[in-house]
Image (cartoon, grey):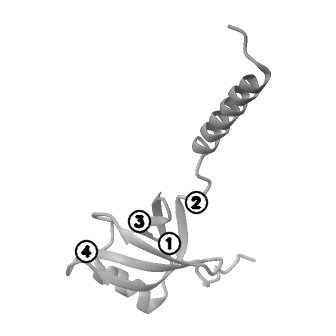
């Protein structure tokens, strides 16, 4: 069967549409998987477990995120970080626009102590 001009163009357009949809769907997520900053708000799921919190990143963004299971920090410890403005590193994953924290870790603060030099 010979393809007529219009049918050939329609088939080509359909193939291009499918190929571009596949390329868009296969693009890697370039959002960061570790965020660093300060905890500015927290909701506890229980006495020990964090339910959700807001992180102010080092570049000033406010990011609300849900906690998933044991994230490595208790609600009380997270409150200490909030109160003392101690920074944290948060490992995250994404579900669409939703940010989910899977791990929260302390970030070592640089010391201001000076070490005397030998003369």
In the rendered structure, the answer to whether residue 71 lies left or right of residue 7 reads left
Q: Earlier in the sequence, mark 1 or mark 3?
A: 3
User: From mark 2 to mark 3, how far is it between C-alphas?
Assistant: 12 Å
- Tell me the number on the disc at residue 49: 4
Q: Which residue is mark 3?
A: 101
User: From mark 2 to mark 4, how far is it between C-alphas?
Assistant: 24 Å
Residue occupying image coordinates x 46% and y 80%: 54
Residue 69 placement: quadrant: bottom left
Residue 27 placement: quadrant: top right
User: From mark 1 to mark 2, how far is it between C-alphas?
Assistant: 17 Å
Q: Earlier in the sequence, mark 4 or mark 1?
A: 4
Q: Which residue is mark 1?
A: 107
Dot 2: element? loop
In the rendered structure, the answer to whether residue 35 lies left or right of residue 65 reads right
Mark 1 or mark 3, which is nearer to you? Answer: 3
Residue in the foreground of this view, choosing between 18 and 110: 18
Q: Earlier in the sequence, mark 3 or mark 4?
A: 4
Residue in the foreground of this view, choosing between 102 and 119: 102
């Amino acid at each position: 069967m010979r393809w007529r001009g219009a049918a050939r163009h329609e088939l080509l357009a359909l193939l291009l549409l499918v190929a571009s949809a596949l390329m868009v769907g296969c693009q890697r997520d370039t959002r960061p998987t570790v965020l660093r900053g300060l905890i500015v708000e927290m909701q506890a799921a229980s006495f020990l477990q964090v339910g959700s919190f807001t992180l102010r990143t080092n570049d000033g963004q406010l990011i609300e995120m849900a906690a998933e299971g044991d994230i490595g920090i208790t609600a009380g410890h997270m409150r200490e970080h909030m109160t003392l403005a101690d920074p944290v590193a948060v490992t995250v994953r994404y579900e669409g626009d939703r940010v989910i924290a899977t791990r929260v870790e302390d970030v070592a603060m640089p010391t201001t102590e000076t070490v005397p030099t030998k003369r």
